[in-house]
């Protein structure tokens, strides 16, 4: 057996009363075994995430994880739970985007605290990601600036420009319309028919 399920078997479900730590989230997400699943739709991986971190996500969504914000990696871990985990746990569902506003707030707090200066480029890419996921044009202005600030984030910068172009054009992400119960305009429908229009 290979892939994320193997790691899941080695780290069997924790007892309900054991608190997950920020280090566990960071170690999991940035492990070499998990990186191939970052941008890949995989039901098995999503199910693994639900088993291991579903309860943690519900806690973060309901009350936040303020006790994690004492360190830069703790801040990043909370943002990962709110931003990335939401998209895996509730794929093709409105709940995938329900924590976006909270994730942006946590990112802005982390920036104000200078937390990003103490993270690796790869970690910073995910710290900034809620700004890329936002449908607020002002967030994209900041995302462009942040991703452009480090040559190590050049790939993320190019991806952010593609996201910003969609927001500048439509004021929202059309590929979310169906999940969010929004009616697409004719222009949006034509856009969605194009290859690579959805992220």
Image (cartoon, helix red, strand yellow):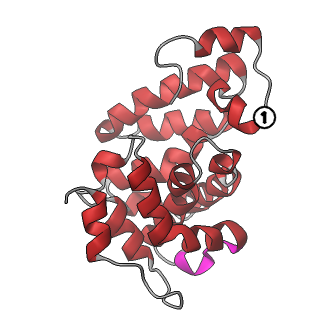
Residue found at x 51% / y 33%: 144
Residue found at x 42% / y 41%: 41
Find the residue positioned furthest to the front: 1
Q: Position of residue 70 (x, y in %)?
A: 52, 78
In this rendered view, identify the residue nearer to me: 124 or 196.
196
In this rendered view, identify the residue nearer to me: 34 or 124.
34
Q: Position of residue 65 (x, y in %)?
A: 60, 75
Residue found at x 59% / y 51%: 90
Question: Which residue has dot 1 on it?
Answer: 181
Looking at the rendering, in which quadrant would you find the N terminus?
A: bottom left
193 w.r.t. 143: above or below: above
In this rendered view, identify the residue nearer to me: 50 or 165.
50
Q: Is residue 128 left or right of residue 118?
A: right
4 w.r.t. 128: above or below: below
29 w.r.t. 53: above or below: above
Q: Position of residue 12 (x, y in %)?
A: 35, 78
| Residues rendered magenta in the picture | 63-68
């Amino acid at each position: 057996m290979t892939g994320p399920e193997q790691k899941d078997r080695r780290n069997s479900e924790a007892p309900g009363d054991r608190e997950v730590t920020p280090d566990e989230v960071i170690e999991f997400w940035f492990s070499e075994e998990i990186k191939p699943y970052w941008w890949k739709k995989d039901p098995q991986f999503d199910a693994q995430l639900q088993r291991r971190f579903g309860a943690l996500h519900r806690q973060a969504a309901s009350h936040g994880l303020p006790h994690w914000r004492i360190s830069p990696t703790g801040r990043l871990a909370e943002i990962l739970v709110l931003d990335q985990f939401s998209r895996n746990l509730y794929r093709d569902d409105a709940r995938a985007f329900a924590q976006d506003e909270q994730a942006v707030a946590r990112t802005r707090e982390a920036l104000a605290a200078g937390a990003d200066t103490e993270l690796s480029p790869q970690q910073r890419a995910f710290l900034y990601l809620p700004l890329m996921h936002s449908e607020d044009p002002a967030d994209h202005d900041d995302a462009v600036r942040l991703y452009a600030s480090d040559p190590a984030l050049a790939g993320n910068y190019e991806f952010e420009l593609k996201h910003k172009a969609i927001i500048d054009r439509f004021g929202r992400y059309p590929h979310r319309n169906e999940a969010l119960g929004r009616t697409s305009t004719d222009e949006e429908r034509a856009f969605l028919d194009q290859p690579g229009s959805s992220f």
